[in-house]
Image (tube, rainbow, N blue to C red):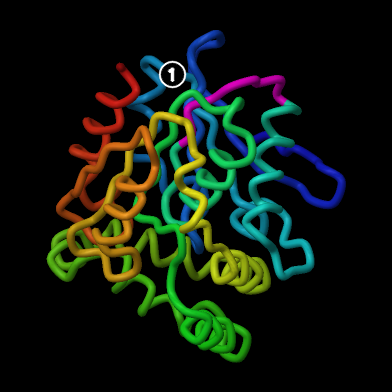
Amino acid sequence: MPIYNSGDSRIHYAIEGQSGAPILMFSNSLGADFSMWDPQAAEFQKKFRTLRYDTRGHGQSSPTPGPYSIEQLGKDVLALLDSLRLDRVHFCGLSMGGMIGMWLGLNAPERLNRLVLCNTGAKIGTPESWRARIEAVQKRGMNSSAPAVIERWFTPAFRQKEPEAISRILKMLEATNPDGYVSCCAAVRDFDCRDQLGRIPTPTLVIAGAHDPATPPADGRFLAQNIPAARFVELNAAHLSNIEDQDRFTDELAAFLSF
């Protein structure tokens, strides 16, 4: 897979599909690499050119010294688009990726055609909860924190029904660089755009999971109520709704992008 070398980091990405087709860019959650979008990639490559990338500090992208900010991660996206000479894209981000999408909607709307914000919030968690998570990973590593993350990511019913998928995703999470993870935790902790959402001009789809403890449906409704051109969809899933309710997720995304 190709690597983009920016001034201080290496960003791992994959661009697939027909040349000349509209670009659909996916941005992953905290603790995931771009393989989390496998359930959608093949389907959308029929009509779009998909662009997936590992967020700084995740997957095969370099874990530069932190802490990071959502602004920094958003500028990574713009630098990658510039390097690929892509003027405008549809952008779909989940959790941390959704925060990056909000930053782009506020600071670079001219680069966006449509915006999809999945299982995310204008502010997520409390400083205390993020401090505890950061300290746990710093002291005990990713393996000790991964089981609790899996419980937030998926409902008990899905974990019981799909043990192979859970095992694969657990390995992905455990393989995340702890320094990169902690640095991105700080980015999520410090981001708060609740009073700025009205300035996002981009047509937006907000997707929430009915059983999501990390970013509950109320967080998604708040986004949809405050972004002027937004609509809201609630899926039967916890946090990684694109995996747990992948068929409906894909259908809702396809319908929104076909307007």
Magenta region: which residues? 84-91
Location of residue 108 in the rendering, given as x and y in whole percent from the top left corner = 63, 34
Query: What's the residue at 40%, 32% (across, down)?
Result: 41
The image quarter in which residue 2 lies: top right
Location of residue 82 in the rendering, given as x and y in whole percent from the top left corner = 73, 27
Where is 258 relative to 214, above or below?
above
Location of residue 64 in the rendering, given as x and y in whole percent from the top left corner = 77, 62
Location of residue 257 in the rendering, given as x and y in whole percent from the top left corner = 34, 23
Query: What's the residue at 75%, 37% (across, down)?
Result: 4
- The residue wearing badge 1 is 48
Residue ranking furthest to the bottom = 139
Type of amino acid under label 1: Phe
Is residue 101 one of those drawn in magenta?
no
Q: Nearer the viewer, residue 189 or 177?
A: 189
Please state, as top left, top right, bottom left or bottom right, where the C terminus lies in the image.
Answer: top left
Q: Is residue 249 left or right of residue 127?
A: left
Q: Is residue 244 left or right of residue 203?
A: left
Query: What's the residue at 30%, 47% (across, down)?
Result: 225
Query: What's the residue at 53%, 62% (across, down)?
Result: 192
Secondary structure that dominates the magenta span: loop
SS for callout 1? loop
Please state, as top left, top right, bottom left or bottom right, where the N terminus lies in the image.
Answer: top right
Q: Is residue 31 left or right of residue 152?
A: right
Residue ranking furthest to the right = 7
Mark 1 burial class by Cα count in 10 Å: few <14, some 14-19, many 20+: many
Is residue 90 one of those drawn in magenta?
yes
